[in-house]
Image (cartoon, rainbow, N blue to C red):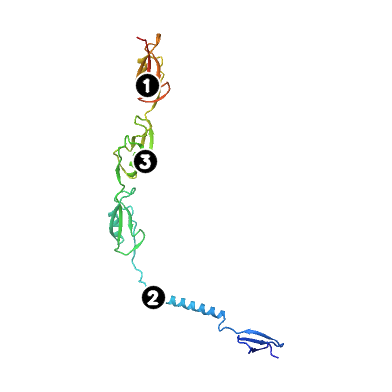
Amino acid sequence: MKLGGSLRRNRGGSDGIWKRRDPAGGSQDTRRRAPWDRVGVRWIILASLVLALVGWFGGYLVATQIVYPAPPPPTGLVQVPDLRGDGVDTAQERLAAVGLTLGDVDSLRHPTIPRDLIMGQAPLPGQLALPGSSVEVTRSLGPQLRAVPDLSGVALDRARVMLETSGFVVTVDSTEADVPRGRVVTTAPPADSTVALPAQIRLTVSLGPPLVPMPSVLGMDEKAARAMLDSLGLVVSEVREVFRFGRDQGIVVEQEPPADSLLERGSAVRLSVGRRGR
């Protein structure tokens, strides 16, 4: 007896099926195997990838190390000093001390760095350069100077636009003044002062003339009433005569505006004074 049985070809079919003879007398079908199984294909693909990577890396080494080798690193490099805040003459001396030279010198305005001081350079501070190399610098022309315009009597909105478009920073204060309300009274710094931009300009704007309470002049004679109103900056614009008997002769019997009204200086006041009929 043979263990595991034996195989016999199924001659009656064409599907390539082998039948395993079973020791017990039966048979078992076994399909024909492919030329390579799946595990073998995977190993072939993996081996191809490894060979491709090795070939690429080897070609890279040959190209960079043999065909086109990198130049040897330069020797004797010097560190570029920080020239910011120095004058041009001082910078030239410092560069010469380390074996460098001063290159092109540009100029730009700067709002805070004083005039003629270096504010930028190339190469940057701390970088390495070959001896004899040049360093370009940019020096400051200082802040831009501008005169404060005379804005007395100008409306606030217009004055603000004029200043801000000229590079000034505007702040606003207010005060009572004889200047019409909303008009500029003064500027600080004063007009025609020369300042560095950006400079802050404070505008003092009028709230209008100060208000005074209308006094009561009823019962006063006309002359005394006029003197009181004049001392307060009020103007008697009209005096009407009204018929009165007795002691109301020459006495103020009516006034307009009424007492305690708040008025601007220069406001008109109308009085009525008692007179006998003719």
How crowded pointer 1 is (Cα within 10 Å; few <14, some 14-19, many 20+) is rated as: some
Disc 3 marks a residue whose amino acid type is Val
Q: Secondary structure at mark 3?
A: strand
Q: Which badge, 2 or 3, comes first in the chain's sequence?
A: 2
The answer to which image quadrant residue 177 occupies is top left
Q: Secondary structure at mark 1?
A: strand
Residue positioned most to the right = 24
Residue in the picture at 51% in, 78% down:
45
Query: How many numbered circles are shown?
Result: 3
Disc 1 marks a residue whose amino acid type is Val
Residue in the picture at 28% in, 58% down:
104
Along the line of sight, which residue is nearer the eye, 259 or 245? 245
Residue 87 drawn at (x, y percent): 29, 53
Distance from disc 2 to disc 3, alpha carbons, whole Å, reads: 67 Å
Residue 25 drawn at (x, y percent): 71, 88
User: Does residue 271 appear anywhere in the picture?
Assistant: yes
Q: Nearer the viewer, mark 2 or mark 1?
A: 1
Task: Look at mark 1 in the image and give the residue it sits on.
Answer: 269
Disc 2 marks a residue whose amino acid type is Ala
Is there a contact, CB below 8 Å, between mark 2 and mark 3?
no
Residue 96 drawn at (x, y percent): 29, 59
Task: Look at mark 2 in the image and give the residue it sits on.
Answer: 63
Task: Look at mark 3 in the image and give the residue it sits on.
Answer: 170
Distance from disc 3 to disc 1, alpha carbons, whole Å, reads: 40 Å
Distance from disc 2 to disc 1, alpha carbons, whole Å, reads: 106 Å
Q: In the picture provided, is 38 more to the left or to the right than 208?
A: right
Please say if 102 is above or below 256: below
Please say if 178 is above or below 273: below
Q: Secondary structure at mark 2?
A: helix
Residue 166 drawn at (x, y percent): 32, 44
Q: Quadrant of the N terminus?
A: bottom right
